Amino acid sequence: MNESSHCVRPRGPARVARNVPGVAALALGALGALAAPPSAAQQQDFSKVEIRATQLAPNLYMLVGGGGNMALLLGNDGPVLVDDQFAPLAPKIRAQVALLAERPVRFVINTHWHFDHTGGNEAFGGSGSVIVAHENTRKRMSTRQLVDFFNLETPPSPAAALPLVTFEDSVQLHLDGEDIVAEHVANAHTDTDIVLYFGKANVVHTGDVFVVGGYPFIDMGSGGTIDGVIAGADRILARTNAATRIIPGHGPLSSRQDLQDYRDMLATVRDRVVSLIRKGRTQQQVLDAAPTLEFDARYSKGMMKADVWVQRVYVDLARRLRPAPRR
């Protein structure tokens, strides 16, 4: 684990440099992978969002609201919050924490860099919470980023929003009688993903390595790959059992079987697309082959319809399976 305090820069509001509102905002929300970009957050009515808590263990809660799912661990060592949604929701998150805990949040753990999971970082970090994340999360939040699928550009985050404690592979926190293991999952939803295991409670927070409600958004511009998501699901399955409760990045509390179904769907579609690419099929021919057909009733929801998702899978796999053309 690398632990350091870094230089302080003047804080300012988050900005989106270009082409964010409208279709991109709607698409991100419908996907359930990024609820909305920062500028679109200004258009949303966060006054109607409620932060709701579900108790999973005597000192562990799942919190839901207007962005990625959160987890909250309570105890004498100080609350630990996993993810913090959008910046405008920070006061509501604080209020919900105050209903359950006597002390302010001590640690915030980010599952990845996307702003519907890190938007509250500035508020919590600025008031003394220690932010923990994978080292790539800090790197990406420190620089301008482009989510190319939506032509969505975000500026560097203010200093108070950046993780102060980062790690490369894994880190363990021993707090309030719970052993939390945070493990990096390489090149999955992004290259910044971590999965959190609450060992005694038998609860896992997957971040957006696993989402419920549709085909996943894999952020290839941030290092994401379908192979990485499948490998991440395999690692989670290997560390869990039938009684494990899973907090997905988005969607309702889930079971290990839900994750197994998701993983099997991903692998089946991936293998079919790989086979078609190796046979020399074009992108349109892969789409015409309908490799997701039996899964569409369950997963083809929102803006990420089957054909859009298959196109993304094709692009991801084709760039790695086919050699670059010679110049």
Image (spheres, helix red, strand yellow):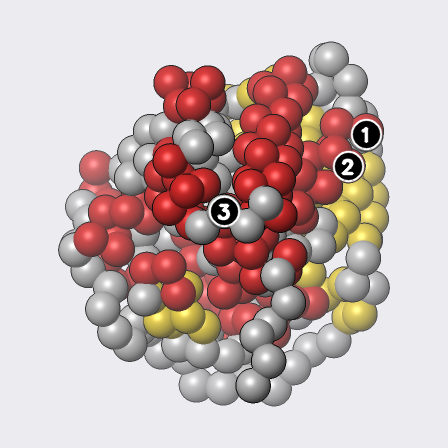
Can residue 175 be seen?
A: no
> Residue 140 appears at what percent x and percent y?
55, 71
Check residue 8 in the rendering and tell me which mark sits there, or answer none. none
Query: To which residue does mark 3 refer?
Result: 281
Tell me how far mark 2 sits from mark 1, CA to CA.
Answer: 7 Å
Secondary structure found at label 2: helix
The answer to whether residue 202 is above or below residue 24 is: above
Viewer-side label of 2, 1: 2
Q: Amino acid at mark 2?
A: Arg
Query: To which residue does mark 2 refer?
Result: 235
Q: Is residue 242 left or right of residue 53?
A: right
Which circle's residue, 3 or 2, is located before the other in the chain? 2
Q: Residue furthest top?
A: 242
Check residue 239 in the rendering and tell me which mark sits there, or answer none. 1
Mark 2 touches mark 1? (CB < 8 Å) = yes
The answer to whether residue 215 is above or below residue 190 is: above
Q: Residue at x 30, y 43 (%)?
A: 29
Q: Is residue 252 left or right of residue 77?
A: left
Q: Compare residues 92 and 179 and report the one nearer the observer.
A: 179
Mark 3 touches mark 2? (CB < 8 Å) = no
